[in-house]
Amino acid sequence: MKTLIPLAFFSFFLFTNCEQTSSYKKTTKENYVANNYSKKEVNITMRDGIKLHTTIYSPKDKSKTYPILMQRTPYSSAPYGDGKMKSKISPNLHLMKEGNIVVYQDVRGRWMSEGVYDNMRAYIPNKKANQSDEVSDTYDTIDWLVKNIENNNGNVGTWGISYPGYYATVSTIDAHPALKAASPQACIGDFFFDDFHHNGAFLLSYFRAISLFGTYKDTPTDSAWYSFPKMNTKDQYQFFLDKGPLKNLNDYFQYDKFAIKTAENNDKIDDFFWKEIVNHPNYDAVWKSKGIIQHLNKVPSSVATMIVGGWFDAEDLYGPLETYKAIEKQGKDNYNTLVFGPWDHGKWASSGVKNSVGNYYFGDSISLKFQSEIETNFFNHFLKGKGNKETGLPEAYVFDSGKKEWKSYATWPPKNIEKQDWFLTENQKISLIPPTHKKQIHSINFMSDVKRPVPYSEDIKTVFTPRKYMTDDQRFAARRPDVLVFETDVLTDEITLAGDILAKLKVATTGSAADWIVKIIDVHPADNKENNEKLQNHLKMSNYHLMVRSEVLRGRFRNSFENPEPFIPNKKTDVNIKLQDVFHTFKKGHKLQIQVQSTWFPLIDLNPQTYVDNIYKADKKDFKTQTHSVFTDSSLEFSVLK
């Protein structure tokens, strides 16, 4: 039987199956799982008759009972077959060695499970007798597990990173009574704001991953049924520039040969993910139905949640922050905590001692500390301990990425923050003093050339999904004429940003469409002599421009994600961009810099800068070079810790 582990789009397997560190190698060499656990594969029947393939690892020691830790995944519960076992199970090595019943399940339509897959399958609030969704699949699975697995103590916990993190969130809605704890980690919250889209802009850099989620399958398989588009180049910038309009990428997918009908209405649906993206450019009913954030008022207080994320996660930053905030707002009696560290996607599951993101080093044992002191304690308290919510853990356990230290708060954001407007000035400085007269308001202009867009990284390479750019040195962008740079003088006192950021731009364009990108950057001192082994050879920490936060807004969605609208050429227009939360101290001797630009290629697709109804169907003739303006009554609203 041939089994192929998928190249996980969200790099999930990098940390759950492929971590190559000394402690992991030791565990593998000892073959701990095989020596201490028994494996059983079962097919659990859902209420509509579909069977989901489930792998159960049970401790060989039957002298006591154990809780169940479950992960539902679209990435395969492999290895399949008798005698074939994972070398690492459970969220971390501590929980594995302490002893838990660990369950992995292929979600509906993936790998060895029956059914047809649907990306973020819509939740059905009031189901009829045999209707199923991911919520009911989770409920039915837990119900079977607690009734059929020997030596379980009746308590269930769920966890997962990235897409499995989304399924952990799903488990909390209309939860089974046995579910006591859930830890959604880097969880997707809404596909219009996570992963493939950012505020309506398409993440072109994720293009090759689309087939992983969109290739049709309706029978179980233990081998990959999808293939990835081949670029045949190491220069993705030039590849996508040469391809031109997004419509030219259609040839990579033959999605029209599939047609699925739903049992409810017998109508065809957009089965292939690329087709779904192309045909739904706006935040319409399709995307809204897939979102999970709006349903988190249905998380019972009996389920404790710990939301985990990374400040430098390029894939799922919106999801965990919004998941935490939604549960916090709608579940006043819920035990709901937040952990955010200096990690990229899923790095908290690493067994590595040194913690870096790209070029930037944050310290030693950061992930190990989280696993041993936070994650393990959370699950043990609610699954093995008193479960009385008195865990001794903080409400918000967050890492200051500037000071490089952990902080604990009773709320997130902290209560002692102050909203401050920082204005962009004509001499490209930043001021706390707003312009008081029209004569003080000026426009700063730049040309946005569709044939020479601003790159998101100076690296010449191809990546399956972007990660490193989140801490990249931004000097390469600051030195381009189509990137506006505003910065403070050298700081004489430290400034800590703790919470979200709102860019309140006043802009104009000679065209009728444009994207707007805002980046927050920590400019390190020129005499900074720090160094680390991850730093690229051509870089030094002297004057390093660390990107702390960045975000894009597709300008057509400035007033509504549902109803896009063109710009009126040369008319001054408000564009507000919400940047996700940060926790970063700009230290004395550093400078805070803001960059504003209109292209970010090929992280996001190229805007034609001429309004069309659907950018995915734009023609080459629609792409026009335009001149954009940013006015000096633009500001950024920061959440400043006092």
Image (cartoon, rainbow, N blue to C red):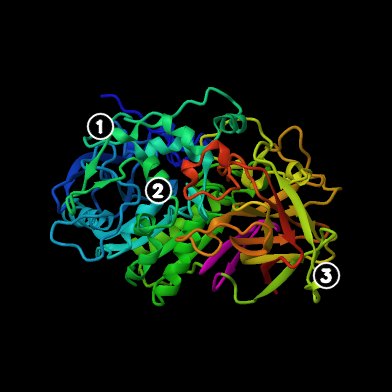
Query: Looking at the image, is 174 positioned above or below residue 46?
Result: below
Q: Kindly give the residue lying farthest to the top in the view shown.
A: 232
Q: Quadrant of the N terminus?
A: top left
Q: CA distance from mark 1 to mark 3?
A: 66 Å
**Image side of residue 275 versus residue 42, left or right:** right
| Residue at the disc numbered 3 | 440
Q: Which mark is residue 221?
A: 1
Closest to the camera, between mark 3 and mark 2, is 3
**Image side of residue 612 versus residue 390, left or right:** right
Q: Circle 2 — which element?
A: helix
Circle 1 packing at 10 Å, graded few (<14), some (14-19), many (20+), is some
Mark 3 and 2 residues: CB-CB less than 8 Å, in contact?
A: no
Q: CA distance from mark 2 to mark 1?
A: 20 Å
Q: Residue drawn at (59%, 39%), measured in percent from left and top?
A: 602
| Residue at the disc numbered 2 | 163
**Image side of residue 28 versus residue 600, left or right:** left
Q: Quadrant of the C terminus?
A: bottom right
Amino acid residing under circle 1: Thr
Mark 1 or 3, nearer chain start: 1
Q: Circle 3 — which element?
A: helix
Percent across and percent down for residue 186 are 47, 52
Query: Looking at the image, is 411 positioned above or below residue 503?
Result: below
